Amino acid sequence: MNPQAPVHVVIIPKKHISGLDVVTSEDGRILGHIQVVVAKIAKQFLEMKNGFRLVSNCGIDGGQTVFHIHYHLLGGRLFGWPPG
């Protein structure tokens, strides 16, 4: 709805986890799988050949507005630092 880069993909696990602040060791397999999925998706976009950014906001102060863990995979432009 409001892309932050030329390529903006949202990755959402099926299991409900409200945020990174409540992740448990049992969630490690899911979170590890997300990293593999991110690499696979990034390889599909020529715009991400020089790099990308993966973002997950946590908590109100961290900018989280949807309380189901999800990741924003951003690419296709140069990102600055600090990000916010």
Image (spheres, rainbow, N blue to C red):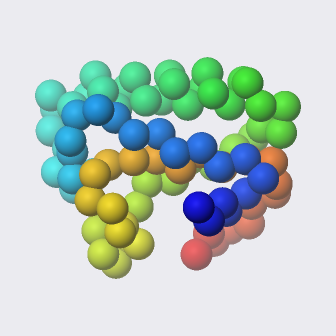
**Left or right: residue 41 compared with residue 19:** right
Q: Is residue 21 above or below residue 24?
A: below
**Residue 78: x, y in percent?**
81, 57
Q: Is residue 75 above or below residue 49?
A: below
**Residue 36: x, y in percent?**
50, 22
Which one is nearer the viewer's eye here, 72 or 24?
A: 72
* Total marks in image: 0
**Left or right: residue 11 compared with residue 20:** right
**Left or right: residue 81 compared with residue 12:** right
Is residue 50 something that shows in the picture? no
Spot the residue most to the front.
1
Q: Which image quarter holds the C terminus? A: bottom right
**Residue visible at 16% across and 51% down?**
22
Which one is nearer the viewer's eye here, 10 or 19?
A: 10
**Residue 63: x, y in percent?**
41, 72
**Residue visible at 26% across and 59% down?**
67
Q: Is residue 35 above or below residue 84?
A: above
**Residue visible at 67% across and 62% down?**
4
**Residue visible at 60% across and 44% down?**
9
Q: Quadrant of residue 48?
A: top right
Q: Which image quarter holds the N terminus? A: bottom right
**Left or right: residue 78 compared with residue 7:** right
Is residue 38 something that shows in the picture? yes
**Residue 12: x, y in percent?**
39, 40
